[in-house]
Image: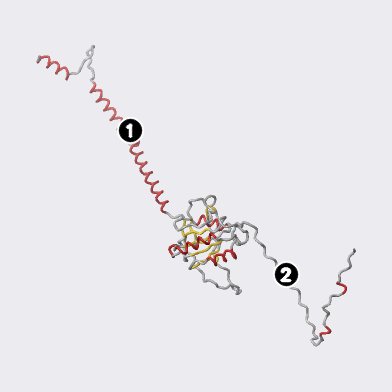
Amino acid sequence: MSNESSRVSSGSDSPSHGPSGETRRGRRERERARARTRTETTRTRPVVERYRGALLGFAAIVAFVLVGGFVVVQANSKAYACSSEMVPAPVGTPLANGSPAPLGQVQTDMGRSHILAPEAQRFAACPPASGNHYAGVDGPITARYYGPDDAMLPQGWIHNLEHGGLVVLYDCNMGACDDATQKALQELYRTFPNSPLCAIPKGTVGPVIARFDEMKAPIAALLWGRVLFQDKLDTAQILEYFATQAELKNPEPQCARPTATPATSPAPATSASPDTSASPAASPSLAPSPSLAPSPSPS
């Protein structure tokens, strides 16, 4: 019994032989050989090929971080910026010829090119009464009253100005978001008249009433290239401003503008008679001359 065990034990440790007496390679030896081959092959492969999976994973992580960072920056960045804020001019300053000044003050033209949303825009002066703006579905925007929580971009309502519309802006940081002012602005839109020249009804291109906090006054009423500042909302003055200044300068008129009637030349003055002692009887008769009487009718 012990001899058989010893033979089995010694047979398990010794390599097996084939019919012709050659030594057979066991399964473990073959596995060791394949492992050595794989190791040698891996060592001879290029670094990029060896670590391709890790490199692709790292690249994916970097791309995800970059895209996420770009989205966050875009979400937190403003779609417009102001290089300066327009300073309100004294109200009622007469013109050089002494005639009363029209309501509002002129703003330097900042262009009128169309840009694509959501492209950002920097305005030389705010509130902008001109400048590059959106077109299509992003401008002109719907003419109506917008509440303090409605974020309306100037690139949208500048297109309304280009078509002759009125834009009324209120600054919440300067106290124009109180209940009384907001109710008066809503009433202004509700009772707004047709435009003075083209008779365009409200809601077509104007008025746009919206919040804008980059101003030096609580209220600003805008027409193309012109701004009327108010320290307190005065709807009667805004209506007068619209009636007298609207549709005069906007670069895309909605109807033909009236042309100024040329002034007629005054008749030449007759020279006075040197004889001032002439009696009234010598004055020409005011009765019509017979020769000016109408000729009899052919009938």
At x 35%, y 39%, the residue is 57
Residue type indicated by callout 2: Thr
Instruction: Please identify the quadrant where the N terminus is shown.
Output: top left
Which residue is under mark 2?
A: 264
Q: CA distance from mark 2 to mark 1?
A: 99 Å
Residue 243 x, y percent position in the rendering: 59, 64
Q: Where's residue 118, x and y in %? A: 48, 51
Which quarter of the rendered picture does the C terminus lie within? bottom right
- Residue at 53% in and 50% down: 137
Q: Amino acid at mark 1?
A: Arg
Q: Is residue 251 left or right of residue 293?
A: left
Which residue appears at 79% of the width and 86% of the height?
Answer: 276
Q: Secondary structure at mark 2?
A: loop
Q: Residue furthest right?
A: 298
Q: Nearer the viewer, mark 2 or mark 1?
A: 2
| Secondary structure under the numbered disc 1 in the rendered image | loop
| Residue 240 rendering spot, x and y as whole percentages | 57, 66
Q: Residue furthest left?
A: 2
Q: Closest to the observer: 242 or 268? A: 242
CB-based contact (under 8 Å), mark 2 and mark 1 = no
Relative vertical location of residue 61 with respect to residue 229 in this rendering, above or below? above
* Quarter-of-image position of residue 199: bottom right
Mark carried by residue 45: 1
Q: Nearer the viewer, residue 164 or 13?
A: 164
**Which of pointers 2 and 1 lies earlier in the amino acid sequence?**
1
Above or below residue 223? Residue 11 is: above
> Looking at the image, which is closer to me, 178 or 83?
178
Image check: 251 left or right of 178?
right
Q: Residues within 10 Å of mark 1 (few under 14, many from 20)?
A: few
